[in-house]
C-alpha cells in the first residue's frame, strides 16, 4: 500500500465534508469542557480551599457514567442524536454560566458547587453515546474506523489544549469572566446540529435499534455477544482500571498542587500544571508539594 493510500485509510473520514465540520466543531465543544474543568476547579479552590470538594468533583463527574451509561446509550438508540447532544450542550452552557455568575457575585456556596459538578457529569453521560453513534451515520461503514480514531484524537487533544485556553482566559480576564466567555465555545456545535441532516438513525439497519430494552439485562446481552472478541473485553477492562486508579482525578486537585508550588493566581504556571502532559512528565521528586506554603 502506498503512503498516500495509507494516509487515506487513516484519515479517510476527513474526506467527508460534513464529518470535517462536525469534527472541528465538536473539538471546540470538547475544548470548552476542558476549559470549564480547569476554571471551575480554580474557582472551587479560591472560594473554599477544600480538598474534600475537589475530591467530590471527581466523584460527581464519573458516578453518573457508572450509573446511567446503559440508559444514556438506550436513549441514543431511540431518539435523534442531534437533540440529545444539544440538550447536553445546553446543560454545559448553563453550568458554565452559573459558575461565572455565582463566583463574580460572591454568592457561590458549597451546595451550589456540588450541584453544578453533578449536573456537569450528567450532561457528559447524556452526550457521550450520541456523539459516537452519529459518526456512523455521517461516514458509513467504510470510514468508521478512521472516524473513531479521529474522535479519540480530538478528545485527548482537547484535554491538552483546554487547560492552556482556560489558563489564558483566566490570566487575561479572571476566572468568573472566563467561565462566562466559555459559554460561547459551546455554541458552534449546538447551532450546527440544527442544520446537520444526520440523526444517527438514517440507515435501515438502525431501525431495529429504535426500541431497545432499557436496563442492565440489555447490557449483559451485549457483553455476552462480544465475549467472543477478547480484544473488546480487554479494552473494557483496561479503560475501567485506568478510570478507577488514575482517571482525571489529578486535575481537580491541581489548584492546591499549584498553590504548594508557589502559584497564588490563575496564571500560566497553574494552567501548565493542569495540562495532562505536564502531569505525565512530572518527576517524582519535583512533584512533591512543598511544606509551609509557597
Image (tube, helix red, strand yellow):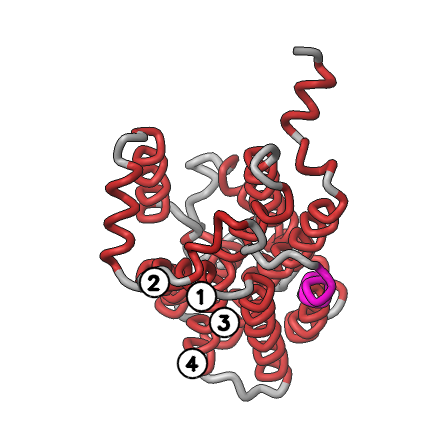
Q: Residue under label 3, please give it.
A: 44
User: Per the image, is 274 magenta?
Assistant: no
Q: Residue under label 2, please give it.
A: 63
Q: Where is residue 239 in the image (x, y as percent from the top left)?
A: 37, 41
In front of the other: 192 or 117:
192
Q: Is mark 3 on a helix, strand or loop?
A: helix
Q: How crowded is mark 4: few (under 14 residues within 10 Å), some or many (20 or more)?
A: few
In front of the other: 272 or 132:
132
Q: Is mark 2 on a helix, strand or loop?
A: helix
| Quarter occupied by residue 292 | bottom left
In front of the other: 15 or 282:
15
Q: Nearer the viewer, mark 2 or mark 3?
A: 2
Q: Nearer the viewer, mark 4 or mark 2?
A: 2
Mark earlier in primary sequence (4, 2):
2
Q: Residue under label 4, please give it.
A: 110
* Contact, mark 2 vs mark 1 (Cβ under 8 Å): yes
Amino acid at each position: 500500500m502506498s503512503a498516500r493510500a495509507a494516509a487515506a485509510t487513516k484519515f479517510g473520514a476527513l474526506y467527508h465534508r460534513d464529518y470535517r465540520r462536525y469534527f472541528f466543531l465538536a473539538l471546540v465543544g470538547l475544548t470548552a469542557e476542558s476549559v470549564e474543568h480547569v476554571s471551575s476547579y480554580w474557582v472551587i479552590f479560591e472560594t473554599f480551599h477544600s480538598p474534600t470538594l475537589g475530591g467530590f468533583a471527581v466523584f460527581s463527574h464519573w458516578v453518573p457514567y457508572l450509573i446511567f451509561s446503559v440508559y444514556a446509550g438506550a436513549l441514543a438508540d431511540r431518539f435523534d442524536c442531534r437533540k440529545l447532544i444539544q440538550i447536553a450542550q445546553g446543560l454545559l452552557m448553563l453550568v458554565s454560566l452559573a459558575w461565572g455568575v455565582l463566583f463574580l457575585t460572591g454568592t457561590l456556596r458549597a451546595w451550589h458547587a456540588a450541584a453544578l459538578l453533578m449536573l456537569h457529569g450528567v450532561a457528559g453521560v447524556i452526550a457521550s453515546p450520541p456523539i459516537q453513534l452519529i459518526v456512523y451515520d455521517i461516514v458509513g461503514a467504510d470510514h468508521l474506523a478512521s472516524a473513531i480514531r479521529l474522535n479519540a484524537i480530538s478528545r485527548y487533544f482537547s484535554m491538552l489544549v483546554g487547560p492552556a485556553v482556560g489558563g489564558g482566559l483566566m490570566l487575561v480576564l479572571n476566572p468568573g469572566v472566563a467561565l462566562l466567555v466559555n459559554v460561547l465555545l459551546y455554541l458552534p456545535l449546538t447551532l450546527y446540529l440544527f442544520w446537520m441532516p444526520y440523526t444517527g438513525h438514517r440507515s435501515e439497519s438502525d431501525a431495529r435499534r429504535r426500541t431497545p430494552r432499557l436496563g442492565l439485562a440489555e447490557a449483559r446481552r451485549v457483553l455476552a455477544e462480544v465475549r467472543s472478541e477478547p480484544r473488546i473485553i480487554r479494552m473494557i477492562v483496561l479503560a475501567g482500571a485506568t478510570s478507577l486508579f488514575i482517571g482525571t482525578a489529578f486535575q481537580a486537585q491541581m489548584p492546591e498542587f499549584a498553590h504548594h508550588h508557589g502559584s497564588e493566581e490563575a496564571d500560566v504556571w497553574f494552567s501548565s500544571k493542569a495540562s495532562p502532559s505536564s502531569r505525565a512528565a512530572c518527576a517524582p521528586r519535583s512533584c512533591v508539594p512543598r511544606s509551609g506554603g509557597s
